[in-house]
């Protein structure tokens, strides 16, 4: 008798390996291959290097990898992972990010990073949640790509109001002077991992700090991109 070792997180049908976590049919619904702006990862009619939003907001990093839009079923999976402590989802969600990064690397010749870092949580938030969701997403990516992962390269100094409760202008001001760099990343090609990119305020502050350290390049990798 065949034993079912794992089921799809979305439809509960069997999947061949627990690390996959999402069946083929549900994965197709996530539209991982949707055309996007390579710089900010917002959806577009065709793949573009820079969209009008990028020019307006002066995005300074090389590009953004997003597994999908912040909408069901991906947003529901993220909520289970982040707010219901379903940390077993980490490898499944990281794999979705990996698939899009590999596609960008194959089609658009994106450089493989030397080092992966994750957006940090304030220590108090970490104690409340018990984990940093960006850290759990970053670890499998570093292992699969054979990159250096520095979990303590960034530090969060301030407890912010939760980003999802704020408007766009408030999100931008909510990020000022929040982070510090705690490692020497000079001349390294860095991938910054976050769970969600909304206005890009978090990424912008951290990337500016990394550029002050004279890193060679920065890519931003996220699970979800809000519209």
Image: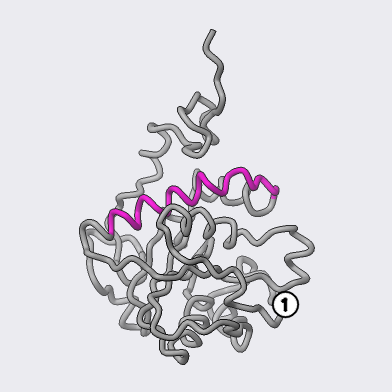
Q: Is residue 38 left or right of residue 163?
A: left
Residue 98 is covered by the magenta coloring: yes
Q: Is residue 223 visible?
A: no
Expressed as whole percent of the image width and height from the top left, the position of residue 67 reads: 41, 54
**Chief secondary structure of the magenta span?**
helix
Residues drawn in magenta: 84-104
Q: Is residue 108 visible?
A: yes
Q: Is residue 193 left or right of residue 53?
A: right
Q: Is residue 196 left or right of residue 88?
A: left
- Quadrant location, the N terminus: top right
Expressed as whole percent of the image width and height from the top left, the position of residue 107 reads: 20, 58
Dot 1 corresponds to which residue? 159
Residue at the spot x=66%, y=70% of the render? Answer: 121
Identify the residue at the far bottom of this view.
212
Residue at the spot x=52%, y=63% of the render? Answer: 196
Q: Is residue 79 left or right of residue 113?
A: right
Residue at the spot x=45%, y=70% of the render? Answer: 115
Residue 20 is covered by the magenta coloring: no
- Quadrant location, the C terminus: bottom left
Residue at the spot x=35%, y=58% of the render? Answer: 101
């Amino acid at each position: 008798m065949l034993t079912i070792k794992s089921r799809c997180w979305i439809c509960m049908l069997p999947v061949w390996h627990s690390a996959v976590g999402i069946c083929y049919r549900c994965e197709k619904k996530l539209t991982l291959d949707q055309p996007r702006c390579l710089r900010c990862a917002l959806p577009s009619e065709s793949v573009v290097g820079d969209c009008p939003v990028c020019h307006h907001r002066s995005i300074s990093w090389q590009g953004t990898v997003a597994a999908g839009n912040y909408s069901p079923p991906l947003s529901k999976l993220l909520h289970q992972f982040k707010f219901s402590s379903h940390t077993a989802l980490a490898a499944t969600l990281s794999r979705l990010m990996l698939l899009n990064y590999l596609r960008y690397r194959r089609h658009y010749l994106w450089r493989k990073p030397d080092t992966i870092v994750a957006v940090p949580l304030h220590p108090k938030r970490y104690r409340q949640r018990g984990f940093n969701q960006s850290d759990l997403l970053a670890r499998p990516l570093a292992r699969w790509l054979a990159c250096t992962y520095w979990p303590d390269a960034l530090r969060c100094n301030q407890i912010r109001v939760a980003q999802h409760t704020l408007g766009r202008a408030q999100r931008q001001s909510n990020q000022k002077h929040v982070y510090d760099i705690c490692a020497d990343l000079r001349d390294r090609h860095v991938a910054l991992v976050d769970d969600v990119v909304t206005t890009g305020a978090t990424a912008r502050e951290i990337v500016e700090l990394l550029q002050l350290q004279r890193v060679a390049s920065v890519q931003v990798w996220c699970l979800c991109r809000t519209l």
